[in-house]
Image (spheres, grey):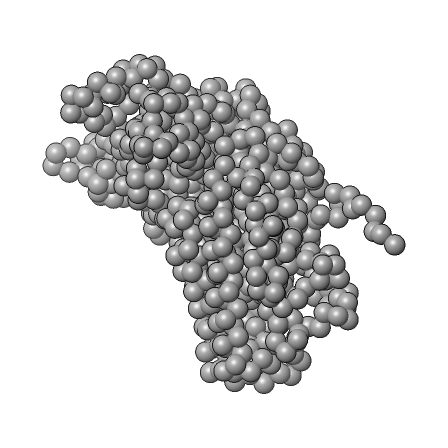
Amino acid sequence: MTSPIPGSEVFSSRPVDPDALARSLPPSLQIHTVTQQQIDDLDPLTYEVIRHRLWSVTDEMGEALKRMSGSPIVTDANDFDFAVSDELGQEVQVGLYNTMLVGAVDLAIYWTLQNRATNPGIEEGDMFLCNDPWVGGGLHQSDVIVYQPIFHEGKLFSWTSAICHEPDLGGSGLGSFDPSAKDVFSESLPTPPIKVVRNFELQRDVADVWVRRSRVPMLVGLDLRAKIGANTVGRNRIHAVIEQYGADTVKAVMKRMMTDAEGRLRSKLTSLPDGTWKATGYQDQSHAGDRGVHKITVAMSKTDDHLTFDFTGTDKQTGVINCTYAGMRGGVMLALLPILAGDIPWSAGGLMRCFDLVSEEGTINNASFPAAVSRGPIGPAWLTGTLIAECLSQMLDRSVDLGASVQAACCGTWDTAVIAGLDERAEQPVPFLNIMMEPMAGGYGARPTADGMDTGGLFCIPMGRIPDTEMTEFLYPLLTLWRREEPDSGGPGRQRGGVSASLAVTPYGTSLPMGLVLASAGKAVAQNNGLAGGYPGNTGLEILARGTDINEQFAAGHIPGDLDELAGGREFGACYAESYVAPGEVLYMHWQGGGGYGDPLQRDPAAVAIDLREGKVTADGAAAVYGVVVDHNGTDDRATAKLRTSMLTERRERSTQHPDAPTMDLSLGRRLDDNLAEVSVGDSRVIACAHCGRLLGDDKNGGVLDLARFEGPSSAAGPQVTSDPTEYVDTPIVFRQLCCPGCWTAIYSGIVPADHPDHSLEISRLLPAVATR
């Protein structure tokens, strides 16, 4: 009897109950496990030694992949990751590379155990390949995972996995990004788990089918073999550990690693206040030609030792800015790992037991098949992580011990540019395709006690790197005019967000135009918001300089160092577009820096002077946003004090006016964040400005904080706003600032749609959270 043809609903994966999954496996697939007593009997020294051995397995797998892969995405940018999982797929140890992938790897193994255990079977010497984001393993089809079961004495002992982003896997768009895709069928074909290795031998028919889909088959073929090799390294290393310490002992360590990670995170959560925190963010444009703004919203609730992330109210799936459940889960892990688990070993299988996800299907961060999802990881999944980070930071900001983990948003997105064409430098012209990896050098968000790292990388790839410029010019017919940090791109604040960088390239070594695909967000609505009154970092910007005189300048021995030095016209790159770059033209990219923390008018003028000297801000930026005047002798303290006073006066005059209110005794209060304090007055609890003591709200009347409000053009945020929202969207976009009506300190600053909800005003996010502490 044959099985019915499966519908699309079969190709979906969710977390599973491990005991139920184990019971569902066929008798032919025996699994290795241990008792709780064996776990409890582990001695501490053995546990630590084996735990670090398993950690080293992922590091060795990473080195193996990098040495065998020929793709700059892997060798230069470190956009990949690894995991060692137990017999049921729970992640025991993950790598320090692309952490968003952590939220998807186990889903693919769960699905494989549920759907491949009988036919074609799971056997020793197998490896599976998958790029179906509804199944898991990766966040979009360009994330390709190769994973293997490891057996010991005939029983399934564990799994290892290797995953990386591929430069191109087909579809109608270069690099498998189609800015006009209406569904997944215009993108790379999603492939559910398929055996690519049987009995330790690569299946040539499967490998040939796989690489045939790509515009760069050699690189895809190399990556396939590199991932197989990395898994082989992982299998050999795990067998060596088993041989030395025994299978039961190694498995007991695996289980303890997850339990310990879970326990440590639950203990940390228990020490924090209960409550609910909210955040809402946006994707500007959903596809080529769209001029809309699309919302993701989350309410994070913490009760005792557990978190719930509720995304109810998020907009319906649309265009190419969708991710599947795996992407939403990966976005949560993007924020949770560094913010809450930075001091906990990353045994993700244990950490993920500490939260639940609530989401409506068919939304932009939980899309249903056959939505277009090529933009998933660097659009909605990343935004999901940014919003989770915002909620976690609000919760942690009131903790003396854990407040150091608070961080404003990093660059918040990835400015994608894919260039492809014909390289004519050799005797025989060859096609090429390059995903520009330079935006890896994004700015990190500021912390309450430290500036964000300048061009420090991406929040989701702790070990990310940018390509070597000379290697890029060696591999592709491109000439880099400049790649440099840009002043004023870090979000202004008491602590400044990390600055970003820009890149300018021109075709060099080809006589033909190159195809260009652009895909990004943050040109109209900020993706890199600040905290506690800190401003967003710069908006993204791509410009195509057409009809330039660059060849004439080359002939004269001059390499231009600024777009203003080039003749010709300027064409703004939309968030999503297909275009071209012809010889004699220039592609300019300026990606995003990190958000600031705290009111920039409270930044130490000496720190601003250092920023000016080091090229992190301009003189105009120092004056316009920080209110600092610097001359050839250094900071002019009198002029600075006068300028800051006038800027506070301007805030008062441009904002809504509020009646006078009492001043609280702050010596009786406790910190809620950089600007707010809770003060007990009799049996009431009130919120006051932490700077001037003005009463801003109380727990009796509820509602919202009494803050002055200003809305103006996004350019009012400062010189870091390099783009005009009306170039990209029709939705009104404003710079919104909420200030204390007593001292006019900024409590909230953001570049948002005019109808953006004011979560920062809600008293319920502050006082109920403190009540149970």
Residue sitting nearer the eye, 591 or 422: 422
- For the question of whether residue 70 can be seen, the reply is yes
**Residue 603 x, y percent position in the rendering:** 31, 42
Residue shown at 48% from the left, 60% from the top: 229
Q: Which image quarter holds the C terminus?
A: bottom right
Residue 390 x, y percent position in the rendering: 51, 46
- Which quarter of the rendered picture does the N terminus lie within? bottom right
Seen at 20% across and 23% down, the residue is 554
Q: State the residue at coordinates (39%, 57%).
A: 67
The answer to which quarter of the image holds residue 28 is bottom right
Quarter assignment of residue 21: bottom right
Residue at the limit of the structure toward the right, as seen here: 1
- Seen from the viewer's position, the closer of residues 203 and 763 is 203
Give above or below for 564 relative to 633: above
Q: Is residue 89 left or right of residue 97?
A: right
Front position in the image: 561 or 264: 561
Is residue 487 in view? no
Residue 482 lies left or right of residue 252; in this view the side is left
- Tell me if 756 is positioned left or right of 451 in this view: right
Query: Quick check: 345 left or right of 635?
Result: right
User: Which of the pair 744/718 is nearer the observer?
Assistant: 718
Residue in view at x 50 percent, y 71 percent? 236
Q: Residue furthest front?
A: 427
Residue 486 percent across, percent down from the top left: 30, 35
